[in-house]
Amino acid sequence: MAPAQSGGPEPRSVDALRRRGILASAGSLPVLRDELDQWARNAGLGDSLAGALALATYEAMANAVEHAYGGMPGPFDVEASLVDRGVEVTVTDHGSWRSPQDGDQDRKRGLPLIHRLADEAVVSAGQNGTRVRMRWELRGQRVEGDLSAADAAG
């Protein structure tokens, strides 16, 4: 699980980050990871949470690149937003789910890492692609515009 966030700056209201139709290629991943990390820092999430969020999302995007399209290019989407006293990031591809090969133990680390980094991670695979939704709780912090969090704080 990601470390609980306490102290530090309160999250600021920022627009959601939405990138759609990104061509699934290894070259696009570092730029997107850095953009997501900067978005998280602009939201005031702190170094630890921003780093966990960027790494988990990078792993989810890498899975889309490697597994969704059988080595061929294809699109995926990334969305990040502050919601309900937390932050959610979703990575969605539009390819086909492919289970990892049994004999390739070195290649089965992405999903377990995502589950360790996020407070919650749900993988949904279907005919229209795979969706990885990750959530981190903002413990002890108030998300701007969240009246229920403001009421609980004071």
Image: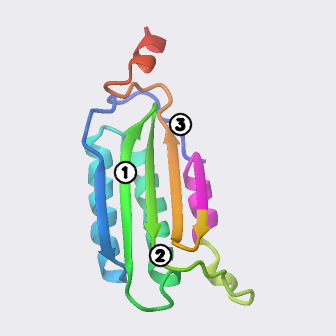
Q: How many marks?
A: 3
Mark 1 or mark 3: whose residue is earlier in sequence: 3
Question: Which residue is denoted by mark 3 in the rendering?
Answer: 4
Q: Position of residue 106 (x, y in %)?
A: 64, 83
Q: Residues under labels 3 and 2: Cα distance? A: 28 Å
Q: Quadrant of residue 74?
A: bottom left
Q: Residues under labels 1 and 2: Cα distance? A: 17 Å
At label 3, the amino acid type is Ala
Say which element carries label 2. helix
Q: Kindly check if marks 1 and 2 are in contact, taking CB atoms under 8 A apart as contact.
A: no
Residue at 45% from the left image edge and 71% from the top image edge: 93
Q: Left or right: 42 with respect to 68?
A: left
Does residue 86 sit above or below 35 in this rendering?
A: above
Residue at 46% from the left image edge and 32% from the top image edge: 84
Q: Left or right: 45 with respect to 152?
A: left
Q: Residues within 10 Å of mark 1 (few under 14, many from 20)?
A: many
At label 2, the amino acid type is Ala
Mark 3 or mark 2: whose residue is earlier in sequence: 3
Q: Position of residue 98 (x, y in %)?
A: 61, 82
Magenta span covers which residues? 110-123
